[in-house]
Image (cartoon, rainbow, N blue to C red):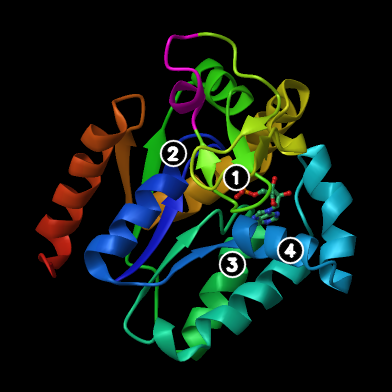
Amino acid sequence: MNLIFLGAPGSGKGTQAARVKDRYGLPHISTGDILRAEVAQKTDLGREAQAVMESGRLVSDEIVLAMVKRRLDQEDCAAGWILDGFPRTRPQAEGLQGILAELDNDVDLGVLIQVEPEEVVRRLSSRRTCRDCGKIFRGEELAPDGAAVPAEGVCPACGGTYYQRDDDREETIRERLRVYEEQTRPVVDFYSDEDKVVEIDGSQPVDAVSDAVLSILRDRFGDRE
Ligand code: AMP
């Protein structure tokens, strides 16, 4: 089962991809996570990608395609995979088809999580990430009474410090949404033309979204629990 999760930044596709990983035991490949690890380790690639990521724009197709090709060649991907945050441009989608054709493989399904842009801004601008353990928190988890979420605070998971990622600042979020409409919407069209996209209402509570996603996967691929 080869899946791609599509949707704007902040749609919750990463959370849903992680839940599908838990259910089906497939590797969850997030190009954003791979790039953030490169930045944290200060590799050459990380140094090159950091400024682009902080501005809300996209890292080059060549870099991301090479990263994904290396990852899909690994043994744990033989039985299937979940791609999250990739492909993000039409050339990436075409590049992926090329990589998969060589492996005699294909994308089975694109899961599109739909959320309105203003909801994305609300969600992402209140999101915080722990500097120490990397865990990501929704605003509601840190300020349950609806109060404003502080820019920095104590991580409830590890006692380290959470902070606001540069790419979760409001101006950057608006830029990321613009980039999504301009560059990633054509990717949705690319897979829709092949009749491979299912749409899920991502404005529902997170468990309801998972139920919808898992029920579609169960219908199409069976339940491997
Ligand atoms: P994400 O966590 O998926 O929202 O990714 C964070 C940032 O990493 C994005 O805003 C881009 O700068 C970069 N990035 C992640 N995936 C890709 C991709 N497939 N193509 C280009 N840039 C990417």
**Residue under the image location 61 percent in, 59 percent down:** 33
Which element is circle 2 on?
A: loop
Chain part drawn in magenta: 138-146
Query: Of the residues shown, which amino acid type is indicated by label 1?
Result: Thr
Which element is circle 3 on?
A: helix
State which quarter of the image contains the N terminus.
bottom left
Q: Is residue 133 left or right of residue 157?
A: right
Q: Is residue 177 left or right of residue 191?
A: right
Residue 184's disc number:
1
Q: Nearer the viewer, mark 4 or mark 3?
A: 4
The residue singled out by tag 2 in the image is 12
Query: Of the residues shown, which amino acid type is indicated by label 3?
Result: Glu
Q: Nearer the viewer, mark 2 or mark 4?
A: 2
State which quarter of the image contains the C terminus.
bottom left
Q: CA distance from mark 2 to mark 1?
A: 16 Å
The residue singled out by tag 3 in the image is 94
Q: CA distance from mark 4 to mark 3?
A: 11 Å
